[in-house]
Amino acid sequence: MSRAHLFLFDEAPLRNVHALELLDAALVAAAFDLPTTLLFLGDGVLQLLPEVSPNLSQEKAMARQLAVLPEYGIEQVYACGRALDERQLAAASLVLSVIRLDPAEQTALFARQDVIIGS
Amino acid sequence: MASSFAIIVQGALPDARASLSALAFARAAVDAGHTVPRVFFYHQGVTIAARYRVLPQDERNDADLWLEFARDSNCELAVCVTAAQRRGVIGADEAQRYALDGTTLRDGFSLVGLGQLLDMTSTADRTVTFPGTR
């Protein structure tokens, strides 16, 4: 049985490597052909900005990692519309196209999942 | 009806209490007749598997408590190998691969890949995550 997995990204970039580590798990889920969905919410929407690049430590930039999602068959990436608006982030400024969800739609998204993993 | 639980632990003492909250949950689940076949330590939670980790004598070591639970409940203590090596928790294979002069993984914990995380969430009835520090 292929269980639907949702990965929640709600931590700001550069504070720690949690988002990069969680993205690794999401990519493995997709590689296992599990239905895999990503949702960015709260400060996590800042992960979607292209300018975030950790120069000093040379960690992988999240933007570059997110670019491989289509190769893994992850086509649906969601973001909390309110979190984007609060941070004045326009869809065009993000590294990939995301589907905006209001709170009710996020609840519906959660209800469709078998497994939800945050960081 | 008895269920099986997949538990993800993302923090450990002294920086987070996730390991203790997860342990309390796991014990309660087993006491109620459920099973916890595997616990997956991820993010900062992997530091629980560090062998050289000394807590003050009057404090219980969360690793000791988990090892006791694992023994009594037949639970596998799985640790994400990538997250662990990032944080200095090194097993024999990694020590050899990176030419390090020793290992730091505590006996009783196993270093595994992320495939084991998804195997766990795909087979258990329910998954519960205990987040660490943010």
Image (cartoon, rainbow, N blue to C red):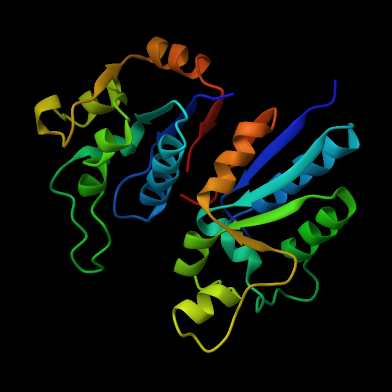
Q: Taking A60 as reference, is A8 left or right?
A: right
Q: Is residue B110 left or right of residue B72?
A: left
Which quadrant of the rendered structure holds the N terminus of chain A?
A: top right
Residue at image x 60%, y 32%? B122
Where does the image place residue A110, in percent across and percent down from the top left? 49, 19
| Residue situated furthest bottom in the rendering | B101
**Residue B93's quadrant in the figure?**
bottom right
Q: Residue at x 20, y 48 (%)?
A: A64
The image position of residue B91, as x and y in percent, is 59, 73
Q: Nearer the viewer, residue A63 or A10?
A: A63
Task: Locate residue A108: give its quadrant.
Answer: top left
The residue at the point 26 percent across, 68 percent down is A57
- Disc count in the image? 0
B34 lies above or below A60: above
> Does B116 sit left or right of B75 as displayed?
left
Q: Percent x, y for residue B8?
A: 61, 44
Q: Nearer the viewer, residue B8 or A80?
A: B8
Residue A94: tell me if it is visible.
yes
Residue A28 is drawn in which quadrant? top left
Does any portion of residue B15 appear in the rendered image? Answer: no
Q: Is residue B26 left or right of residue A10?
A: right
